[in-house]
Amino acid sequence: MLEMFEYDFMQRAFIAGIIIAVLASVSGTFVVLKRYSMISETLAHSALVGVAVALVAEFSPLWTAVVFAVLSAWLIEYLRSAFSLYSDAVLAILLSGSLAIAVIIVSLGGSFNNSLFSYLFGSILSVSSDDIIIIAIFGTISLAILLLFSKELYFIAYDEEVAKTSGIKVNRLNFLLASVVSIIIALSITIIGSLLIGALMVIPTVASLQYKVGFLKTMLLSLIFGLLSVTAGMIFSFYFSLPSGATIVLCVLFIFIISLIVNRKK
Amino acid sequence: MKFSVPIFDVKNLTFSIKGQTILSNISLEVFCSEYIAIIGPNGGGKTTLVRMLLGLETPTSGEIKIYGKKFSNFNEWHKIGYVPQRASLVDASFPATVLDIVKMGRTAKKQLFSFYGTEDEKAVYDAMSKMDILDLKEKMIGTLSGGQRQRVMIARALASKPDILILDEPNTGVDVASQKKFYTLLRKLNQEDKITIVFITHDIGVIADDIARLFTINQKAIICNNPKQLLSCEEMSELYGMDAHLLHLHKHRH
Ligand SMILES: Nc1ncnc2c1ncn2[C@@H]1O[C@H](COP(=O)(O)OP(=O)(O)O)[C@@H](O)[C@H]1O
Ligand SMILES: [Mg+2]
């Protein structure tokens, strides 16, 4: 099994994968508890617009993905607060709008379909050494922010209004969480792919919720599930030449089903 | 006492939404260490009033001062403990132990980069022992009974060491025995710990002896400085229909 680490691309994929697993499962806990799971899908598609622009203009896809995802997160929060629109409707509109724009840009730009495919479903071949640096830097900052505000974010997820009346700056923190989540999603689309990152954010937490334990344990379980599925997924992806995102998602689904069965009628 | 700055000073408050006036021209003051009850028929605007006091709803007109300040200048929210209506109907799958929930009461007090310290632990412990839920500490909130959840929600509010507790019909879905204990507890919090209490309830007959003043709210507010007198008033019965009728029954039984 160690032979796979003889390849540079595989070492890079593993470092990136581990960082992403940590980020996705920790941020996913707050996203799921806020009942805001759909935001990850939408932001991932907005990140894809960034990738499309980068492929046509020959920029670094990771940077542009981060920029587009963050702008989209801000737009979502703005639309939600300024117009009294239903959140899920806002998310659905932006999701399909982003995908349409990304596809149009790519087809206008010529035949980039192959590389776009790897951003849709993830590829262990796609992580460059520059990407690792970007993932490490933004990943550390995002994780630090999440941990720093974890008590507040947890309170807000439990009861937004009571959190507000006890003096927590709910609007600012919602904005911050949306920004951090968008960065994490953009960082993830190289390995997981934009169509599948939502699964890695949401499913580990939903699986850990089946065990009916307190906040800290739930977050730890979801972290373990995220790490396990990313590691296993990348190994299978290497040996069977499968898209990494898809294999990772199958692994996390497997953990979810086991969790459901183990905790039946608990 | 009335010379001190009131905790809430409300003048000519009106709240309309979609062309409908929910509350009109309400003025009231809540003073330190008072025990006040708010009654009124369902849909009368009690919850709306309290939500405006807490800045969750913006009044159409009128003025609210909180500790003598406007909302924009007020930043001591930890002094106010709030238990919303239906707070005890929690989502059963939310991953929270009783301890997790009570600790939330300390969250807003924390500075950036600081962690729960001994002072927080003591406040959390005190709040839980006051509400008699220490033995439930590690239990998941979703597995508790209505009465137990009610006590957890109030312990969370108490953990921030508030000056004032605002309780919006917290007894919905709680059995009679737990309710009795609960009223005794509120009286103790008010008399021994000097916590101001604003209590929205239908059970006015039971607490009539404890409260200092009574607000009856049905679009307009009528303030009564002698709660017992109000309860025997026939006009109230007409104004509040069934609710007041029940009050009379309560009154006779006690
Ligand atoms: N944000 C709102 N939008 C629409 N109607 C509202 C809103 N807030 C309050 N109301 C209406 O105001 C009335 C008073 O409600 P409420 O304050 O909950 O009464 P109570 O707590 O006394 O039962 C109700 O008819 C309710 O539908
Ligand atoms: Mg109400």
Image: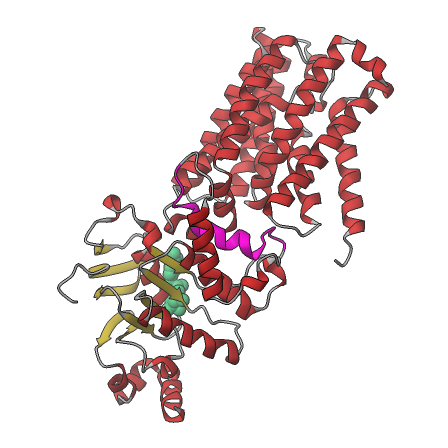
Q: Residue furthest left?
A: B3
> If the image is split into quadrants, where does the N terminus of chain A sit?
top right
| Front-lying residue, B23 or B98 | B98
Q: Residue furthest front?
A: B118
Q: Say which residue appears at 44% left-offset and 46% top-offset.
A: B107
Asked whether residue A117 is in view, the answer is: no
Q: Quadrant of residue B197?
A: bottom left
Q: Quadrant of residue B209?
A: bottom left
Q: Position of residue B137 (x, y in %)?
A: 57, 58
Q: Indicate left or right for A208 with A73 as reference.
A: right
**Does the stretch in magenta take in A133?**
no
Q: Say which residue appears at 69% left-offset and 30% top-offset.
A: A196
Query: Which stretch is magenta?
Result: B93-111
Asked whether residue A68 is in view, the answer is: yes
Q: Residue furthest bottom?
A: B252
Q: Say which residue appears at 37% left-offset and 85% top-offset.
A: B247
